[in-house]
Amino acid sequence: MPTAILTGQPVPGSSIETDLRSLGFDVRVAADAAEAETVLAEVPGDERVALVDARFVGHVHALRLGLTDPRFPLAAIPGAVTARPAGRQALTRAMARENSAGGGTTLAVSLADRILTALDADGTDVHRPELGTLVAAVPTDPQARNEARQAVADIDDEAVRLKSAVKARDGFFTTYCISPYSRYIARWCARRGLTPNQVTTASLLTALIAAACAATGTRGGFVAAGVLLIASFVLDCTDGQLARYSLQYSTLGAWLDATFDRAKEYAYYAGLALGAARGGDDVWALALGAMVLQTCRHVVDFSFNEANHDATANTSPTAALSDKLDSVGWTVWVRRMIVLPIGERWAMIAVLTAVTTPRITFYALLVGCAFAATYTTAGRVLRSLTRKARRTDRAATALADLADSGPIAQGLAEALKKPARGLPGFTAPAVALLGGLAVVLTSALTGFGGPWPVVAALAYALTSGLAVARPLKGALDWLVPPFLRAAEYGTVLVLAAKADVNGALPAAFGLVAAVAYHHYDTVYRIRGNAGAPPAWLVRSIGGHEGRTLLVTVLAALLTASQFTVALTVLAVAVALVVLVESIRFWVAAHQGGAPAVHDEGEPA
């Protein structure tokens, strides 16, 4: 149980002890800094501890924001400072220094605020939550106390808490059609002790049932699928709002939320394809194309953000224009809608599923996603070309990890490192694009089973090695990972379509889904500051160039039916390896007390 050390003289009529206990704290009382240091030393090092001034006046939710957020080692609000185990040493040092400086007398000035000043002087990073209209103060006289209490009474902190549960930046559909009521579902869940992970799991199960309904191929099944997909999205919004409402952030929760979103959407694509097949319409190529396009869109987002995460001198006239447009109300919503975020995308899929056919649904999805991808990628290219930015080694490492280079590309990169130094800055994305186009187009333009795709795949491995032969710090080097993703996924799609036998495209769908999971997992590890997946994992599944080469060799050596079986076996093998390692890693990170994370970035 976390411990709150209440410092200073108690104030008659104060509710601070009751408020702290309502937040789960065991309350201890210390009259001065010396006694507070003694109590601090008695608190186990693996527990959260907080110092709170007994004169504190404020909203309970202000205390909740300042003292219970699991994401930060150290946090503070006026009159209170807290430390998780990771920040305990810094707090103990500051307390000892404050006590040795003469803080052992009766506390006339807030000890918590003096400790915070000492932490700032040490250069320690202390999180200070944005309180907005919430009150958090340490009044020094009766009049100030009465004014603070009146300010607390004037603001409904439950209303503030509900409002802040909604993501600050979201799509139009989510903001106006889901969040106005899903926040109340989140509160209902919190009051019944449900966790965000439980709601996330419920959302996944609902989406899987929706996919099963779509797979029936009946009009009733399609209508039910559309309704359930929207219900799944409501729960998807609710889990994040529940996390913000109750501050139940966790490493495992962030991973589940992100990966389940992809699993839900792609499982639904498969359900639509199965339903269409029951009606005599084969749309597996469209389903796989939609998954490839959507995954590549996400890789563009991830790569661009990582490339500019900590870039210095990161200014651009294009970015300035974008910021100016964001200050005009209607342009904000138009720009958020045309990128087809998850809310708009799922609403479109749900409605079209219910009233049209799977083929029309996939056509609309492909057109919408292609337009959104063109719009966002073009804007980011313009920003990169006009931006005066110096990218860091961290950014270059992240992009190299996102590239997912296997032993072949890494070996070639090492051999080509010296020659690559003299090449122009645009070489990396250019050669990645050309190599990818070569293997995809060769596979598409030659007959199934010919040797030329293998030759093109060997050339692709060479260009892939050249693309990552030097640090990816160029203006457009963030395009390398998405070009490589498009090449690998596109090759699998084309060869499966050229096989022209039953089961080839569903097998390819499974393989791309397994590999895409690995790529998403890499992203979430980097975002969580956990580093890339272990090198043995990347080697064991071949890297992007190894898998591409393997698929072209299988197509050249096997019959179409045998190729389908080989793709199925490969999909199962890759899925087992990456899933087992991913689950092991994230569960271990959660149990090991890894810092909680919560992504408030762009809508997916």
Image: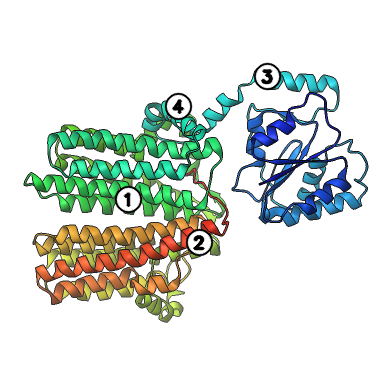
Residue at (8%, 61%) from the top-left corner?
Answer: 500
Kindly give the residue lying farthest to the left in the view shown. 280
Give above or below for 551 relative to 336. Answer: below
Residue at (36%, 46%) from the top-left corner?
Answer: 261
* Image colouring: rainbow
Q: Secondary structure at mark 1?
A: helix
Give above or below for 213 relative to 285. Answer: above
* Residue 489 visible here: yes
Q: Marks 4 and 1: CB-CB under 8 Å? A: no
Residue 552 lies left or right of residue 300; in this view the side is: left
Residue 320 lies left or right of residue 484; in this view the side is: right
Q: Amino acid at mark 2?
A: Ala
Distance Cα–Cα, label 1 vs label 3:
46 Å
Q: Secondary structure at mark 3?
A: helix
Query: Of the residues under marks 1 and 2, which one precedes in the sequence?
Result: 1
Q: Secondary structure at mark 4?
A: helix
Q: Amino acid at mark 3?
A: Ala
- Mark 2 neighbour density, 10 Å: few (under 14) some (14–19) many (20 or more): few
Q: Which residue is mark 1?
A: 263
Query: Of the residues under marks 1 and 3, which one precedes in the sequence?
Result: 3
Distance Cα–Cα, label 4 vs label 1:
34 Å
Q: Which residue is mark 2?
A: 588
